[in-house]
């Protein structure tokens, strides 16, 4: 049976949506439909976490086992709190290295998701949405560079959040977090990538 560790923040636990609708659970459902025997995801994520808070909680969980694949999606709260891209880059690099360890030292089994743009949501009304978009782009450029340099997979979901935010049904009731519909987009992209890796490893 394949195992899956999901590391992140509100976007990983699926704030405001039923557990089955968050992207890790939807991805597992899709993989099972593709005939992969995948266990329910182990999720280390809480709404509001920054990179350093995720790192601290990973240490507290004291995980000793490895996983068939790992996802990492973190950084929106760093941006929200006004932290620098340089600080994010430094802390994200350490998190990604930890994710690779959890994936048995195989970077190809680590799947990094880009940070959604919360600036397009009703929650951001009255804020400098153009600046938020620039910040998110800068953060994602750092995230992407680190992921690809380590030979991890980088999955772009930011443009989906920008495109779908204005479409009814793609945001949760709080007007900030994605709904299950948006998470389904991410889950499909993730499941397709994971399936490719799992098939390749067993050839």
Image: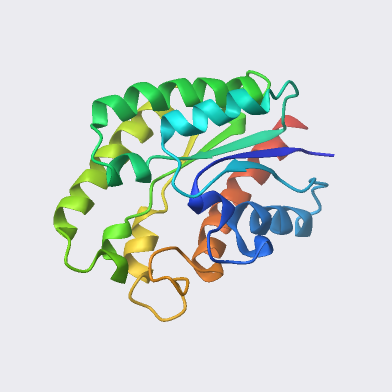
Residue 76 visible, this angle: yes
Residue plotted at (51% across, 27% down):
55
User: Image check: 41 left or right of 15?
Assistant: right
Q: Quadrant of the C terminus?
A: top right
Q: Is residue 12 above or below residue 182?
A: above
Residue plotted at (47% across, 32% down):
53
Hey, which quadrant is residue 16 in on the image?
A: bottom right
Q: Is residue 131 above or below residue 164?
A: above
Q: Quadrant of the N terminus?
A: top right
Residue plotted at (71% across, 45% down):
41
Q: Is residue 61 above or below residue 37?
A: above
- The foreground one among 185 and 62 is 62
User: Image check: 19 left or right of 138?
Assistant: right
Residue 168 horizontal/vertical position (percent): 41, 81
- The foreground one among 165 and 80 is 80
Residue 67 horizontal/vertical position (percent): 72, 30
Hey, which quadrant is residue 3 in on the image?
A: top right
Residue plotted at (68% across, 23% down):
62
User: Image check: 161 left or right of 132?
Assistant: right
Residue 134 horizontal/vertical position (percent): 19, 48
Disc tally is 0
User: Image check: 127 left or right of 146?
Assistant: left
Hey, which quadrant is residue 193 in on the image?
A: top right
Residue 121 visible, this angle: no
């Amino acid at each position: 049976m394949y195992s899956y560790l999901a590391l992140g923040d509100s976007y990983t636990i699926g704030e405001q949506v039923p557990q089955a609708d968050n992207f890790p659970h939807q991805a597992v459902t899709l993989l099972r439909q593709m005939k992969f025997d995948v266990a329910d995801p182990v999720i280390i994520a809480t709404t509001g976490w920054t990179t350093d808070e995720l790192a601290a909680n990973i240490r507290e969980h004291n995980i000793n086992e490895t996983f068939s694949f790992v996802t990492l999606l973190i950084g929106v709260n760093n941006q929200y709190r006004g932290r620098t891209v340089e600080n994010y880059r430094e802390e994200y690099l350490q998190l990604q290295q930890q994710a690779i360890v959890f994936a048995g030292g195989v970077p190809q089994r680590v799947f990094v998701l880009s940070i959604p743009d919360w600036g397009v949501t009703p929650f951001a009304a009255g804020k400098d949405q153009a600046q938020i978009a620039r910040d998110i782009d800068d953060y994602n450029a750092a995230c992407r560079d680190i992921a690809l340099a380590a030979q991890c997979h980088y999955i772009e979901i930011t443009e989906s959040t920008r495109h779908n935010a204005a479409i009814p049904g793609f945001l949760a009731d709080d007007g900030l977090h994605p709904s299950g519909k948006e998470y389904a987009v991410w889950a499909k992209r993730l499941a397709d990538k994971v399936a490719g890796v799992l098939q390749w490893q067993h050839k």
